[in-house]
Image: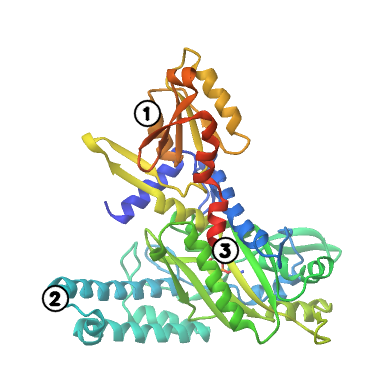
Amino acid sequence: MTQEEVFRNLTAHCKEYGFIFQSSEIYDGLAAVYDYGQLGVELKNNIKTYWWDAMVRLHDNIVGIDSAIFMHPKIWEASGHVAAFNDPLIDNKDSKKRYRADVLIEDYLAKLEEKMNKEVEKGRRKFGESFDEAQFRATNPNVLRSKAKWDEVHTRMVKALDANDLEEMRQIIIDCDIVCPISGTKNWTEVRKFNLMFSTQLGNVDGGVGTIYLRPETAQGIFVNFLNVQKTGRMKIPFGIAQIGKAFRNEIVARQFIFRMREFEQMEMQFFIKPGTEMEWFAKWKETRLAWHKAIGLGDEKYRFHDHDKLAHYANAATDIEFEFPFGFKELEGIHSRTDFDLGNHQRMSGRKMQYFDPETNESYVPYVIETSIGVDRTVLAVLSSAYHEEELEGGEKRVVMSLPPALAPVKAAILPLVKKDGLPEKAREILHSLRVDFNCQYDEKDSIGRRYRRQDAIGTPICVTVDHDTLADNTVTVRYRDTMTQDRIPVENLHKVIADQVNINNLLRKNIE
Ligand code: GAP
């Protein structure tokens, strides 16, 4: 099965089992907006808890806030979003489809990379053991040709983006013979700028009705509360403020399920530091955040850093942590050195001092900021797409199993009476009641035990507990593990510990401080 088919099946599976639904489905849906169902919300909450505890609980110099979505419109002028939060867009006149010009060029570059990688794989097969990849890349004429093209186009794109040169963006698309994926033609319009912020009307801004924006990032709620938190929490630099919340962007190229949405959730942390120390802290936060991701256990090789070619309007250094989704390596988290851009601009615009008084040096300054910014929904997608497996079992039977990290799984244990009589349901419910204070458990007595195991596999429940007639006699149960399908017989009194050992979120947190 191709990665694309697996991804399609995953999307259908998420709907079938109550992880994620298309928003407003009964009205034919709203593009790039999704609702989390009964299992999706549990998974999402577990991810948010893991992030919050790793940032706030494990660091004595980081605190959390929850700021409002609506903010004064001047905030978005100060932050540069009104002037510069734009995408360069181009339309194909035949298909009438709209694209981001830089994404079209990036897709072209990705195809060149793919071509080079295929050539390398051919070489590897041909030369076997003695294959030297670095030498092959440096000498093979086909690879060198593609590499030269890649370098040329990439350099032009970065320059055009930096200079906001929309004509040159269009020219690159023309020169590279990039066609519309739908119509297959090169009949392109001009490239135009499009601001990504949603606006709405609110009464009482400056006494009248005014345009306000739905926040495109949660970070500004942190910046404008910097002094409130610093003073009331008596925070000393370096310190951080963390926040989880909704953000909104009028994305034009909205595709790949919950990867790019118009309403999504971010987990952001602004770390306030002394100017001049930013590169040291930037390196430290890159390392800390990568360790957080790796602790989830999806595979270390699925992550890589990607330094930005074009820096956002606020940054002097930036990198992405990319994850290998079924459609390739894509951004999961951004780490940015934002200098004093935001606090400095808020100070100018509001007329209020946004400064920190350093008691050690007796000087005041506008702090610099390192930001870590991760999408909740992209993390959900990373976890779901890695967990989804279609397996062929002995005897030709198939099962779909979600090998979710147990600490993040929506349901931790399923309690299953073998039959629906002889006092087994009562005993199973007694066990359920003893566990549910600590773990999210499901009770299921419908259908054969095999079918019930499959249902739990499909939603990623790490442990099934089966209550049978022997349970009534000796107070033992069968514990069945999702991934290996192996079974153990254990006393009921050990059940709590067996489940906790597998599913406790602290297992992930511990890996962050090892
Ligand atoms: N405050 C900085 C900031 O917002 P960003 O790189 O634009 O930086 C941070 O966004 C993260 O938010 C991304 O790495 C991604 O995980 C998530 N994100 C951004 N746009 C998104 C969208 N349209 N849908 C889902 N997640 C998105």
C-beta proximity under 8 Å, tags 3 and 1: no
Horizontal and vertical percent for residue 285? 58, 73
Distance between the alpha carbons at the discs numbered 1 and 2? 49 Å
Q: Residue furthest top?
A: 422
Q: Is residue 353 above or below residue 482?
A: below
Per the image, the residue denoted by label 3 is 513
Seen at 48% across and 46% down, the residue is: 406
Horizontal and vertical percent for residue 67? 74, 60
- Looking at the image, which is closer to me, 46 or 424? 424
Per the image, the residue denoted by label 2 is 127
The image quadrant that residue 341 belongs to is bottom right
The answer to whether any part of residue 302 appears in the image is yes
Looking at marks 2 and 3 on the same chain, the residue that comes earlier in the sequence is marked by 2
Horizontal and vertical percent for residue 33? 54, 52
| Quarter, ligand 1 | bottom right
Report the amino acid beneath label 3.
Answer: Ile
Looking at marks 1 and 2 on the same chain, the residue that comes earlier in the sequence is marked by 2
The image quadrant that residue 433 belongs to is top right
Distance between the alpha carbons at the discs numbered 2 and 3? 44 Å
Give the label on residue 451, or none: 1
Seen at 43% across and 21% down, the residue is: 468
Distance between the alpha carbons at the discs numbered 3 and 1? 40 Å
The image quadrant that residue 352 belongs to is bottom right
Seen at 25% across and 86% down, the residue is: 138
Report the amino acid beneath label 2.
Answer: Phe
